[in-house]
Image (spheres, coloured by chain):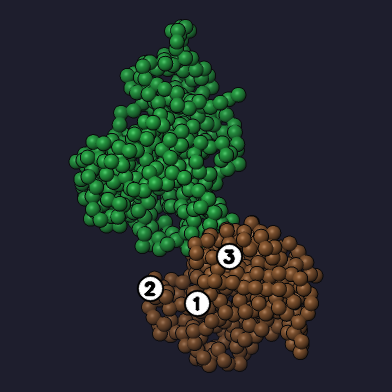
Chain colours: A brown, B green
Amino acid sequence: MRNKHILDMASLSLGEIKQILETAVRMKEISRRAIKKVPTLRGKTVVHFFYEPSTRTKSSFDIAAKRLSADSLSFSRATSSVVKGETLRDTIQNIEAMQPDVIVIRHSSAGAPHMLAKMCQARVINAGDGMHAHPTQALLDMMTVRERKGRLKGLKLLIVGDIAHSRVARSNIVGFQKMGAQVMLAGPPTMMPMGIEAQGASVVDNLDAAIPEADIIMMLRVQKERQKRFLMPSEREYANVYGLNLKRLKKAKQDVLIMHPGPMNRGVEIAPEVADGPYSVILDQVTNGVAVRMALLYLVLGGK
Amino acid sequence: MDILIRGGRVIDPGHCDGVADLYIRDGKIAGLTHGGSRETPPTGCRVVEAAGMVVMPGLIDLHVHLREPGHEYKETIASGCRAAAAGGFSAVCAMPNTHPVNDCAQITEFILAQARLAAAARVYPVAAVSPGLKGEGLTEFGELKQCGAVAFSDDGRPIASSLLMRRALEYARGFGMPVISHCEDPDLSDGGAMNEGEMATRLGLSGIPNAAESIMAMRDMSLSVLTGGAVHIAHVSTAETVQALRQAKACGVRVTAETAPHYFTLTDDAVQDYDTNTKMYPPLRTQADRDAIRAGLADGTLDAIASDHAPHSSIEKMVEFDQAANGIIGLETALPLTLKLVHDRVISMSRLVELMATGPARVLDREYGLHTGMAADVTVVAPDLEFTVDVDQFLSLSRNCPFNGWQAKGRAVMTIVDGRVVYELDQR
């Protein structure tokens, strides 16, 4: 995978996804050691460029780079020249002039990493662009499911919530299907993007009817601001109709996995007892995030 | 200088269509000789051999952004008028969203003065409906008309107030002038960056639904019925608007409409690589919309093809897609893209002349054509001349064009305004 940019799940082949997931399993072992560091990427420079706030993804990438001994630095929108009115193009060309090996970018505009990839010698890894893609999240989700279920093929993933605004949903829809899983989508019709069925996912009208079929239930964060655009009446109503609580969960399979990309709104899309309950693999997702990002840094810099 | 255009196919729909010689004398059409003549032209008369060419009334572009005053780094009136002439246009309508806005006599006069200096295509200024395009009142239509404004529009800023639109149509009716409407319900567009649909969903870009356009187009047609005012719908992009227009015209509503070449050429599939030169306002739509627009062009539902020439520099376009400015330049590609419809047998050559010359003139309520005594605005087109679209050859100051590198067939080889050659293709 040398010389490859990681922009979205659509541009990764089945073979590449498998290679990433297998490499991530090996990388995970490093994080369990007493000395959590290997010299693999010594002398390589990784820049983490976060135009949008992020805690989980940013620290995950940072830890991943450090465990592989890469020199890494991060800067955010607030600490960059963006606040002085510099364009993305100029910011990137300036970073590029310092010859980094990898640029990790999170940006609120869909397609920003693609723009970067066209201008850069460095490898670009998309850490989330607008509503478009979040490939490292999809990869860590797939790793987590594979770890628990031993496979992805033939499983049914149910994603619930604000599909329209979710890059996590978009990347998982593409990724899980490539790996042979089926994807069902549930949520308020106001949050279901037009033409999503064209990507092979099925939209279900009745959440309660879909829950018993699902091997994995992935709850998405719903943002309070959505009320302003009339997408939902209230958080209370949302929790009633689309929230995952213990009552709803009763109808689920015995070995169902509950996932959430975080940050969670406890009591809105997911009840605390469900988030903290036995089916939840939410923190495993975070642990595996480091492994997946280590694998990607390693692979795009020519590792095998 | 007198000009004899010899042996071309002369088309002026409803008047003539056949091989003829066209004489131009003292800036006017001096006559047509059907079948061509063997007479020696008078000395001092320039002879243009036009065998295999199509000779038509000069093309009129109803929708152009010349950017001057205010954004001269994108385009000036001079560069825009030269680009227009090179594209076969003998006249362009200049939209008022300059800086300052063309909402008063002084700006209209300035535009016309700059256009005279440019001495290329004519400029017909379109003045703002509301001062500053703010949608809060009416500009002085009477004085603006006296100064040379040909229509009124708040193009780029849809008139959200139905009451203001009603009054604009009523008041403009008193001057016999149309109101050009940029139809879009901005609330429904909700900050969208492209057409709402499968492609927007795949790319994670927020979408603008078709209804954002058709709702307002239908409103404006209803207001035309109410007021008797003439409304012209700008840059039609959706099947729904085409259908609404067809029905309204069947009922005799005073409505005319234009579309732009990108809406009958491209679909939102073109956005797939986040190329900001595919970002327009209204956005590129689907195949079904494109097909409906082609049908509307063919059956007379649509009256005109206008380029919506919208120059932008890399400052506005080399940015994130959702933050990029809307629009593309079109003066130098509109005719080749429309000729493709003729080559593909979607429309006839005669219909092309209606859509690009006599139709736009009718929207502006002007007598126009190749009748003896009329001002000699003439375009000579080589319909089969193949070339590669190269933005670096454009006379426009801007380069925001999604058709760069396309193979095209047919272009203007000569543009004549008032009997004066303002553009001639160097064919060496």
x%, y% of residue B342? 50, 34
Of residue A177 and residue B233, the one placed in the foreground of this image is B233
The residue marked by circle 1 belongs to what chain?
A: A
Mark 1: few/some/many CA within 10 Å (<14, 14-19, 20+)? many
- Sequence-first disc among 2 and 3: 3
Residue at (46% x, 33% y) in the render: B82
Kind of residue sitting beneath label 1: Gly
Which numbered disc, 1 or 2, marks the residue that appears first in the sequence?
Answer: 1
| Disc 3 packing (10 Å; few <14; some 14–19; many ≥20) | some
Residue B12 pos. (x, y %): 40, 25
Element class at badge 1:
loop
The image position of residue A301, as x and y in percent, is 75, 67
Name the residue beneath numbered marker 2.
Answer: A228
Query: Mark 1 sits on what residue?
Result: A161
* Amino acid type of the residue that numbered disc 3 sits on in the rendered structure: Gln
The chain letter under disc 3 is A
Check the residue under mark 2 and report the chain it is in: A
For disc 3, the marked residue is: A199
Q: Are marks 1 and 3 in contact (CB under 8 Å)?
A: no
Image spot of residue B380 (x, y percent):
48, 25
Location of residue A156 by image quarter: bottom right
> Is B416 situated above or below A185?
above
Task: Determine the CA span between mark 1 and mark 3.
Answer: 17 Å
Q: Residue at x 52, y 31 (%)?
A: B411
Give the CA distance from mark 2 to mark 3. Answer: 29 Å
Dot 2 falls on a residue whose secondary structure is helix
Foreground: disc 1 or disc 2? 2
A27 to the left or right of B199: right
* Res. B151 in view: no
